[in-house]
Image: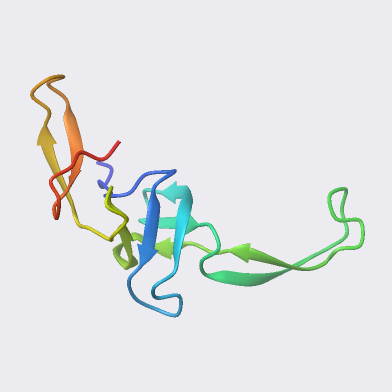
Amino acid sequence: MKPKLHIKKGDVVMVITGEDKGRQGRVLEVHVEKQKAIVEGVNLVLKHSKPNAKTPKGGILKREAPVHVSNLMLIGPGGKPTRIGYKIDPKTNKKVRYAIKTGEVIK
């Protein structure tokens, strides 16, 4: 059984703990099995690369490394970090995410 995560690709999140605490970015990838996500501009690491077609010279590149999802908090509709809840939307009868603080539906 796959674990469920509170964030999805494309969400804007804030890092709540660790070296990059307070930084915000868009989720580029989510690795569900590892419970990690790659966030744009967060947890940058140096990657040594050999020369190839993309980088003829090779060298040292900066890349985003995965961050555990427990260290991320979704930015709600009000622009502030919020916890996520789930409820059934009465209009469409589908499960939706909503911001705990404001009660607004996310996406």
Q: In the rendered image, is residue 34 in sight?
A: no
Direction from residue 44 to residue 34 in the image, left or right: left
Q: Identify the residue at image location x=91%, y=56%.
A: 56
Where, by quadrant of the figure, is residue 89 drawn? Answer: top left
Quadrant in which the C terminus appears: top left
Direction from residue 48 to residue 75 in the image, left or right: left
The outermost residue toward the bottom is: 19
The chosen color scheme is rainbow
Q: Identify the residue at image location x=36%, y=44%.
A: 8
Position in image of residue 63 (x %, y %): 63, 63
Q: Identify the residue at image location x=43%, y=50%.
A: 31
The number of discs equals 0
The outermost residue toward the top is: 92
Position in image of residue 87 (x %, y %): 10, 37
Q: Is residue 35 above or below residue 96?
A: below
Q: Identify the residue at image location x=38%, y=57%.
A: 13
Position in image of residue 61 (x %, y %): 74, 66
Position in image of residue 21 (x %, y %): 39, 75
**Which sits in the foreground, 25 or 48?**
25
Q: In the rendered image, is residue 72 in sight?
A: yes
The outermost residue toward the right is: 56
Q: Is residue 46 above or below residue 37?
A: below
The outermost residue toward the front is: 78
Quadrant in which the N terminus appears: top left
